[in-house]
Amino acid sequence: MTEGTPALRLSGIVKTFPGVRALDDVSFDVMPGEVHALLGENGAGKSTLMKVLAGIHQPNEGDIFIEEQKVVMRSPLDAKAKGVVLIHQELSLAEELSAAENIYLGELPTKSFGRVDWATLHEKSGAILERLKCSFGPRTIVGDLSIANMQMVEIARALTVDAKAVIFDEPTASLTDAEKVVLFDIIRDLKARGVGIVYISHRMDEIFTISDRISVLRDGSYRGTLMTAVTNEEEVTKLMIGRSLDLTRNVQPAEMGDVAIAVQGLSCGKMFQDISFEVRTGEVLGFYGLVGAGRTEIAETLFGLRTPSAGQILIDGEVVKINSPMDAIRMGISLVPESRKEQGLVLGMNCKDNMTLPQVGDLTAGPFVSDGAEIAIFDQYRDKLAIKTPGWREKVGNLSGGNQQKIVIGKWLSMRPRVLIVDEPTRGIDVGSKSEIHALIRDLAKQGYAVIVISSEMPEVLQVSDRIVAMFHGRLMRIFSSQEVTEDSLVQAISGLNTDRVA
């Protein structure tokens, strides 16, 4: 391959589904040793394009070239054999098989009479896992691994072949900060070997850290390519969504009311200890910390999913016992969980049924559920939250990530809670939808809700919160006001370097 020859090139790619033109004349290239970021809102066509590249979908028009040789990807195995590997956003692992079997799935090494060469399989996969600095071995059953380690198995698949191009689709969504460092090292290693990288992520900090060029899709069409070194987040965002976003921090004091919920000395085994804070009506209280700091566990305890080992919870100044989610709901507490697809939605059900699920028992007409009452609730919150869907009959699984999140929020708002807990509100959501969710959270506080937001993204927690709780290894390190907090002081606190508490 001569210098200047793309590792991968797409020319005029068109992909249609019944009633939808998902990709419309998309063309761009990826050079050897380049990290080429692909950005776009949910529904812009990124995942469809990657599935075309990986042989999952066949294009209706257009061509794919590898090192300027025209190729046809008939299946994922065919694409992999030609040197194109897709690392899925959604895990595609066989959980009952070992890590080694998953890494070489479809191409297990064999010996005579087609028998699996287990020694070779474990040796090869063990070397790959060691290179990825994984803490588990090739014989580990994938179903016994954490989501983050499952993602590492997914990434390991890309290292089994002499890849020309590797596509990373939201690779860090389930990774800890330490695992992200390992991933970026692997990507830099692939770059050094001359592999072309396509990197899809909604996280702008990652894009500007790891990429060389940025291409943008909007509404299925190619909108342009920018050099990362000479562009900025504002320019990229405007190309993505056709408008500028308000990225300013929240520094205006909110008009707060009475204390809606308070915890005093709350502990839950080794997960978190001696936590005390309060949230007022009209306030957004942010929780920020590294993975494993105990933030989600606090939310689950407030919602009755965990039993505290010490301390007390007060609602409107009265000590309460929350033994189950039903208790929490009755007391006016709702939880939008961290993983909307696994914990917040039934993807095969329609929008209406998802939104009314917690209160379906109260919406009966005789022995039957009242369709009219359900539809009225759905219509109210679809309009209130600006949910984009063809109608209530649409399956939730067909909606974009941002609209799925709004369905979950609408489900709990329809229960009229006093306290709304939102865990990772914009995980896997594009920047345009993020801005809408952030505005929604601030608006809910103005309407008198007491809102708790848990986020792993510093810009997000700075943008929406009136006060920020910094957590470290299950301990509350400090509570900052939005006026006093700085990025440096917040990082110090979540790293265990500052123990001064400020109410």
Image (cartoon, grey):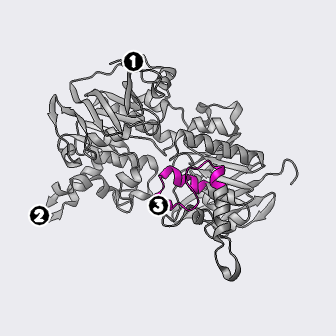
In the rendered view, does 467 fall on the left or right side of 138? left
Please state which amino acid type lies under the numbered disc 3.
Answer: Gly
Can see residue 282?
no
Please state which amino acid type lies under the numbered disc 1.
Answer: Asp
- Foreground pick, 52 / 157: 157
Element type where label 2 sits in the image: loop
Residue extending farthest left: 366
Magenta run includes residue 144: yes
Element type where label 1 sits in the image: loop
Q: Residue at x 28, y 41 (%)?
A: 301
Give the distance between the C-alpha atoms of the residues marked 2 and 3, in whole angstroms: 44 Å
Which range is magenta?
128-155
- Foreground pick, 286 / 472: 472
Percent coordinates x, y for residue 178 in the rendering: 56, 40
Please state which amino acid type lies under the numbered disc 2.
Answer: Gly
Can see residue 331?
yes
Query: Which disc, if any, is residue 366?
Result: 2
Which tag, 3 or 1, sits closer to the chain's start? 3
Percent coordinates x, y for residue 406 in the rendering: 37, 46
| On-image quarter of the N terminus | bottom right
Percent coordinates x, y for residue 97 in the rendering: 52, 66
In the rendered view, does 33 fall on the left or right side of 2? left
Residue to which mark 3 is pinned? 143
Image quadrant in which you'd find residue 183: top right
Which tag, 1 or 2, sits closer to the chain's start? 2
Residue to which mark 1 is pinned? 500
